[in-house]
Amino acid sequence: MLYNLLQEYHGVLDDLGLYRLVQVLYQLEFRAFIAVLLSFVLVLLAGNRTIRWLIKQKIGDAPEFYHSDLNELMARKAATPTMGGILICGAILVTMLLLADLRNGYVHIALAVLLVLAGLGGADDWLKLTSARRNPGSREGLYAWEKLLFQLGIGMVAGFFVYRHGLGDEAAHVLNLPFQRTYEPQTTTLEPGVIVLGALSFTLLATLLIAGTSNAVNLTDGMDGLAGGTMVVAAFAMMALCFIAGQPDIAQHLLFPYVKGSGELMIVTGAMAGACLGFLWFNCAPAQVFMGDTGSLPLGGLLAYIAVAVRQEVLLLVIGAIFFAEMASVMIQVGYFKATGGRRVFRCSPIHHHFHLGGWSEQQVVTRFWLLAVIFAMIALVSIKLR
């Protein structure tokens, strides 16, 4: 909004001698890092009041797991409210509306993904939060198939419109594989052998990735600060990819897909990083509030959507390796349990609980997973140069 107002009233501000004071907003990098600071401050300012309101709504017991030892370890969290993701999503939304170019199609799609998945997660969390107020026997939260249906739906819609937005530019539809050059050196011509996706394959890939990453981040949200801290690292890494993809000279120099207009997604990634940093203020051990589905579903969905927009689905698998390892551990555990009639691969899944039950303290699990997230992000960014 501020950026669009600056464009609209450029002449008036210049006549008043005020233009030089605000012209820095034209710089994308400046707005991106201001987005980090603004979203961080917004969460801090709204945090205590929001947590007090959530505590008033909190009725019920501690989270239940299919493991008595884990239930004992998590018993202290009984009084901690969930649905703290409204702080994260609210800060991201306000920051995007203030600092992003609201005429940009990629920003429009990001807003849709944020609002739909935040609404989905919010409905689920609200049902869980107020379950004891309703009739005995009423369900707690949405059914898994209901959430998956909406996740696949928004993934399909987002993928379709991202594809449409990039029509006329083959680079916006390439399947960017590891170590593969997108362009021939010193030219804007696509390398022979580069795969350009059609509408159906592009939309299918986007749908699976958005829904899958949304669930993966949701599964990671099981310890104080784990999902939030890991998302900070992933968001900053994705910000770097958005910067490269949105700058034609840099993208072509690195033989990286240039996607016109995608640089504006730096504002979204900056807002995500700042909001998660602010949330960690309240979510670090011992947590005052949990993110819940309200935060984890839209964060995962946004991260995947941005990766699709800048054509870096494969690098997302590296940047978000912690998230996908958590999801894979659940799939392996459930599959093996059913196939063997009750045997388990891990002590408990997702895998962070496996290490917790193995003797690591919660703080050790979280800190070590953060460190691994940093390493994976560094590997992803360094690999850009290996083309």
Image (tube, grey):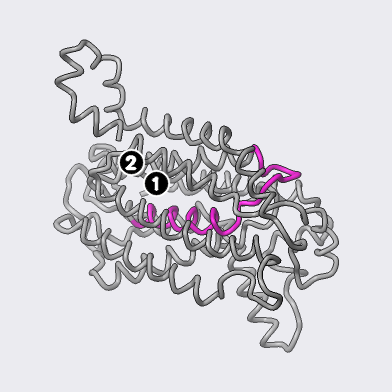
Describe the element under mark 2 as helix, strand or loop.
helix
Q: As displayed, is residue 118 above or below residue 46?
A: below
Relative to 2, is 17 on the left or the right?
left
Number of callouts in the render? 2
Q: Are the residues at dot 1 and dot 2 in contact (C-beta closer than 8 Å)? A: yes
Find disc 1 in the rendering and name its residue: 384
Q: What's the magenta bit mostly, secondary-structure-wise?
A: helix
Q: Is residue 299 magenta?
A: yes
Quadrant in which the N terminus is drawn: top left
Q: Position of residue 338 (x, y in %)?
A: 67, 86
Front one among 357 and 105? 105
Front one among 220 and 111? 111
Give the amino acid type for the residue marked by disc 1 in the picture: Ile
Query: In terms of image quadrants, where is residue 194?
Result: bottom left
Residue in view at x 25 percent, y 60 percent: 173
Query: In terms of image quadrants, where is residue 138?
Result: bottom right
Residue in view at x 85 percent, y 65 percent: 69
Q: Is residue 294 magenta?
A: yes
Q: As displayed, is residue 372 above or below residue 66?
A: above
Residue in view at x 78 percent, y 69 percent: 347
Relative to 235, is 313 on the left or the right?
left
- Mark 1 and mark 2 lie on one chain; the one further toward the N terminus is 2
Q: Position of residue 292 (x, y in %)?
A: 60, 56
Find disc 2 in the rendering and name its residue: 244
Describe the element under mark 1 as helix, strand or loop.
loop
Q: Which residues are magenta?
A: 281-308
Q: Which mark is residue 203?
A: none
Residue in view at x 55 percent, y 43 percent: 276
